[in-house]
Amino acid sequence: MTTALRKAAPLIAIVALAIVLRLVLLAVNAFSFNSDEAVLTLMARHILQGERPAFFYGQTYMGSLDAYLVAGAFALAGESILVERLVQVMLYAVIVLVGYGVARRITGNRHTALMTALLYAVPPVLLTLYTTVSQGGHVEMLLVGSLVVWLGLYLESDTARMSSRLMWLAWGLLVGLEFWIWGLGLAFTVPTALWLLWRMRVRGWRGYLLAALGFALGSAPWWLGNFRTVNLAVMELLGQRVAGTATTGNLFGNVALRIFNFIVLGLPALLGLRFPWSAQGLPLWLAVLPLVLYLGTLGYALRKPVGRLQATPLKGVLSPGYPSGVGIAGDKRSEPVAEAGRWLMWGIGVTLFVGFALTPFGGDPTGRYFQPLYLPLFVFTADALKALRERVGRWAWLMLAVVLIFNLVGTVQAALTNPPGITTQFETITDVNPRYDAELMDFLRANGGTRGYGSYWASFRIAFLSNEEIILIARLPYKADLRYTPRDDRYAPYGKLVEESGSVVYVTTNHPVLDELLRERFSSRGVTFSEKQIGDYHVFYNLSRQVTPDELDIVRK
């Protein structure tokens, strides 16, 4: 084994561990399949058929890069949920590598970087969920955002080299791409951009112009896709779509509620103390040591002395893999680089907190918008563990092991509690047991029910699973209070197919109130029908005439 391969072996093993753990979860069918993921797979199928969507269906703020990547995988390996999820697994493997690179850049210490990668490899269930089950851009947002940070660190330390001009262009391209993929990536790009402006304010303007050009190129799909509706797109970028998730009716009350959500709901999900879809998690006594480590990490990161943010690097012996200008000798850090890098990590946290508190996204209880925080959390935790090892020796590895085991046990418990399994559904009424999907599809085919109406959480799942033989457009409410938004009907061509059909069915899920209302409205309009319960599904079929949900007047808007 060569020296280079020997040095790379631990990182290769960590990346392999990250991949294997996810493959095991996929093998035991630990993740539920819902309509958000189904929309992504349908988009990938339609791309192979010639469509070119710029955004996730029904939205103007989440780019379709994930769908194009999945479409490529479908072209190579066939269309399936597994193939789509394997794309996410491979992308996450790259995130582990980039996390290692960021930690190495900031700390200059290989062992700290390896610990950062290991924390990525065995993360809390929140990160495992949203980087294995695609929701339209989570993995790409994390990957490109991490690359924005890594390349920003490279630019700050390598301005004397001619290649930095190309790197400025590449950095701007990544920032633009991140803007198109998902606005949540601003948690990475805003502090990195401000950090570079501060650190390099006296080093010329050519780099900034190249970065601006790169941004224009990378974000072009966003501008072209929103050419006629920029105002609407900006509003959706700021959370208009989720404006009703939680509100008190006034600005200060909303901000207070969002800060409460951040601390009481979001952070526990981030750290693995609870599952994203539930208030429950592992027994609290198991969380004591991980919580002690995380609190100690926060204290260590806050009290660590911060030197001057000077732009001139220290002189010293260069460690392998670092460009000229980074003064790192072995495990000794270049203090301006290390301390400034820690400022950048704090900037990610502050930017996300401000965005969460001031926009409607702060009403979301799942913790899914906290994912950018994992980069600073893991870097700080690894750095604190290195400092702990210098004081207590190998006992520090015990703390690392405790956190990894805690994350792993939480993931296993969630996977074994199936249904619901590891799921993105945080409302029980929307969680449909997939065990009855095949029976439902067979029944609809046998009873002329391949066209009709359903709720969002059934329609797109069934469309993909039936190879779009069965189309149930999302015109029925799924919330307990019968609220409905036309945005659930994400794909207009399906509506035309249903309108042109000779007969329709109505398929509801976990909604006895809606079932009773449909019975009453059908009867009051002289429509006869038959009913069938199939697991979580309830089917109204053999309708005496075709009738639309608008005619039945069953939803609150």
Image (cartoon, rainbow, N blue to C red):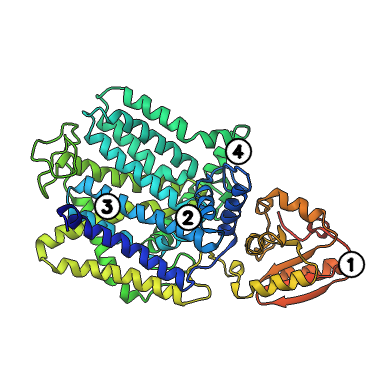
Q: Which mark is residue 232?
A: 4
Image vertical order of residue 542 relative to residue 320, above or below: below
Q: Nearer the viewer, mark 2 or mark 4?
A: 4
Q: Secondary structure at mark 3?
A: helix
State which tag comes first along the sequence, 3 or 2: 3
How far across and how far down the image is residue 46, in percent? Answer: 62, 50
State which tag comes first along the sequence, 2 or 4: 4
Distance between mark 1 and mark 4 Cα atoms? 41 Å
Residue topped by disc 1:
544
Q: Which mark is residue 257?
A: 2
Q: Secondary structure at mark 1?
A: loop
**Residues at marks 1 and 4 touching, judged by CB atoms closer than 8 Å:** no
State which tag comes first along the sequence, 1 or 4: 4
**Dot 3: within a 10 Å radius of its alpha carbon, few (fewer than 14), some, or many (20 or more) residues?**
many
Q: Amino acid at mark 2?
A: Leu
Residue topped by disc 3:
100
Q: Residue drawn at (77%, 50%), measured in percent from left and top?
A: 496
Q: Nearer the viewer, mark 3 or mark 4?
A: 3
